[in-house]
Image (cartoon, helix red, strand yellow):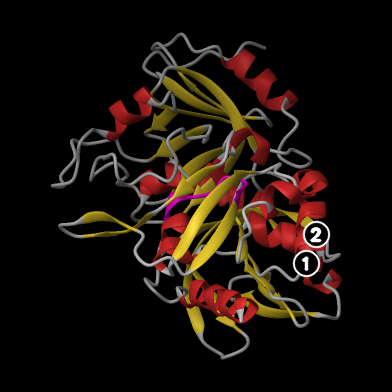
Amino acid sequence: MTIAPPPEATGALVLADGTVFWGRGLGAKGRSVGEVCFNTSITGYQEILTDPSYAGEIINFTFPHIGNVGTNAEDIETVTPAVRGFIVKADITEPSNWRAAQNLDAWAKSHNIVGLAGIDTRKLTRRIRDLGAPHAVIVHGEAGKLDIDAALAEAKSWAGLEGMDLAIEVTTRQSYGWDENTWELGKGYGKLGEKKFKVVAVDYGAKRNILRCLTNIGAEVVVVPADASLEDVMRHQPDGVFLSNGPGDPAATGKYAVPVIQGLIEKNVPVFGICLGHQLLARAVGASTKKMERGHRGANHPVKNLENGRVEITSQNHGFCVDPDTLPKNAVVTHVSLFDGTNEGFRMTDKPAFSVQYHPEASPGPTDSHYLFERFAELMTAAKN
């Protein structure tokens, strides 16, 4: 049976089960398939839309006023966004912020990102909460002329993120140096001062602000592709290796990443992982990972540090997690989610390696978790001495 769109609809979200949300298209015209997730953040939508970890995802923003501060050239995490699409409740207004350089709608068009406004985002969020993240196609076209049947067929046939290596799609194609540090009002981004460490950052979909946090601890950073070999990494003579965030199934990325990480551990090189890097480090020491029904995405997630009893307000974006019951005896769980009890971090007791699932560089706390970069610096200092 052909699904006819309402005459006024210029956009739609078509779920694989046949549910259709009608709305108003924005951003680029066309259609895109992906997994629908929701993000509860009130601010930082431009950082979210440019986070490479959202490759394969269509983001449903729960905060209704997305776009109100516009966009600019500074608040990006990568030059080429990998998100499949985004959904907002209210129409995008003209920006009201002194840093705004472009309207979000125009920015989305320039990056070929399909958007949708005017749907019941709370209803969609409840559906994801109750039934899990659905496969869907987001459509933006001419009023009354949307091909919903084709979109539904594409949504039904999409294989999904499980078993998919997306890190290889968003990683850098060649190595490069990074010396930019964090932003200051009136000054913008600074540059690396005294060089205390040499850090190789393996780019599985690295966010720029993580690299800036590394330079803040005095690290001269060299970024290498996700599939860099152990020899590629070690030829830079690093004091430490950082395993970045990224999208996709860690089991798929781990086919080439895990042997490299195991080699680093054997050489006693200090290792620090975040997000996908956390999951890959876990797999490298023998643990398993699994797909989450809903995932964690937002800037208000409480995580308990089990080693000092403190609670950190964290930023998160992941659809897979580490199974803590499969960690080896020489791995200690250090952090746990207070939302659902899932693993949020661990460290090795006999090797200079640790990782966390959340994003300390995103500053939701705002500085609750910055100590993790200092911990990495301490491990590198100890290794050098």
Expressed as whole percent of the image width and height from the top left, the position of residue 106 reads 29, 26
Tell me what residue is drawn at x 59 percent, y 55 percent: 200
Q: Can residue 266 be seen at all in this image of the molecule?
A: yes
Callout 1 touching callout 2 (CB < 8 Å): yes
Q: Left or right? Give the position of 120 relative to 187.
A: right
Q: Note whether 334 is above or below 256 in the view shown.
A: below
Mark 1 vs mark 2, CA separation in Å:
6 Å
Tell me what residue is drawn at x 57 percent, y 91 percent: 308
Check disc 2 and give the amino acid type: Gly
Q: Left or right? Give the position of 334 relative to 92.
A: right
- Residue at label 1? 267
Q: Left or right? Give the position of 4 relative to 164.
A: left
- Count of number-bearing discs: 2
Of helix, strand and loop, which one carries label 2? helix
In depth, the one of 286 and 138 nearer the eye is 286
Tell me what residue is drawn at x 78 percent, y 67 percent: 267
Q: Note whether 72 is above or below 334 in the view shown.
A: above
Specify the quadrant of the image occupied by residue 348. Answer: bottom right
Residue 384 falls within the magenta-colored stretch:
no
Q: Quadrant of the C terminus?
A: bottom right
Check disc 1 and give the amino acid type: Lys
Expressed as whole percent of the image width and height from the top left, the position of residue 32 reads 55, 24
* Range of residues picked out in magenta: 202-209
